[in-house]
Image (tube, rainbow, N blue to C red):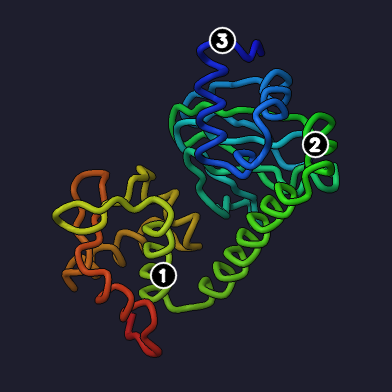
Amino acid sequence: MTTSSPIAECIRLFLKNNTFLGGLPDNVLDVLISRGHTKRYAKAEVIYRRHDPGDSLMMVLAGRIKISNVNADGKEVVLAFSAAGDLNGEMAVLDGKERTANVTAVEHSEVFVLYTRDLLPILSAHPQVMLEMMQILCEKLRLASAIIEDNTLQMRNRTAKGLLRLAQQFGRMNKNGIRLDLIVSQSELGEYLSLSRANVSRQLGRLREANVIKLEGTQLIITDTKGLSEIAEATTSKY
């Protein structure tokens, strides 16, 4: 990619303002941009699959993606959602091993790809930036551990905790509360919460009856964060 092009300049600003690469000197960042490339994906298009070569780091520029796997019963389990500014593939940069999950576009998305062969030498030469990337990876591992623990909870608590996690990542304040800036089907939400679609629908209905969320078509608004948090942390539940 030519670093003097308008597209490259947009990518430079994005990386500077939204990613750990913003800590690199401008001339080094220009080198990376010149060696990377952008890709666009349609809704539901597979970006890569588990066991594909782990030879690159991907940064989401626009849109939404989901990271998932298939369990022993053949059911998809959504591990996380990512949006603009999020990274995917940090482990591949560090160890070069195959992908550990499937990545799919939830909506029309654009990503910027950097190959390990280009990125790793620069990170080695700038340890502070490498440290920032490792901190991001640690945060993801902590989140993954929390999700595993939360999925042992009863359905009502689990749903409430899952919505709070999504709100922290995708929430946008408005006059009615926190709107989730993430459009996913109830089936995909169920795959994220390890619940069936029917149970997701039932639990969302009960949370709505409790006046802690509001559903507006495909949009979900958390109207009472404190109330939703109390439900998430409740030690007993009849549901």
Amino acid at dot 2: Ile
Instruction: Write the residue at 72% across / 42% down.
Output: 50
Answer with left or right where residue 44 lies relative to residue 166: right
- In the image, 39: left or right of 196? right
The front one of 230 and 135 is 135
> Along the line of sight, which residue is nearer the eye, 107 or 120?
120
Check the picture and name the quadrant holding the C terminus: bottom left
| Contact, mark 2 vs mark 3 (Cβ under 8 Å) | no
Q: Residue 28: where, in percent of width, then height? A: 72, 29
Asked if 149 appears above or below 167 in the picture, the reply is below
Q: Which residue is mark 2?
A: 122
Above or below 19: residue 108? above
Left or right placement of residue 138 versus residue 171 in this view: right
Residue on which the image places disc 1:
161
Q: Amino acid at mark 3?
A: Ser
Q: Residue at x 85, y 36 (%)?
A: 121
Cα separation between marks 1 and 2: 38 Å
Nearer to the camera, 197 or 143: 143
Query: Mark 1 falls on what kind of element?
Result: helix
Give the labeled residue for mark 3.
5
Mark 1 and mark 2 lie on one chain; the one further toward the N terminus is: 2
Residue at point 55%, 67% (across, down): 147
- Under tag 3, what secondary structure? loop
Disc nearest the viewer among 1 and 2: 2
Mark 1 belongs to which amino acid? Answer: Lys
Cα separation, mark 2 vs mark 3, equals 23 Å
Lower sequence index among marks 1 and 3: 3
| SS of the residue under disc 2 | helix
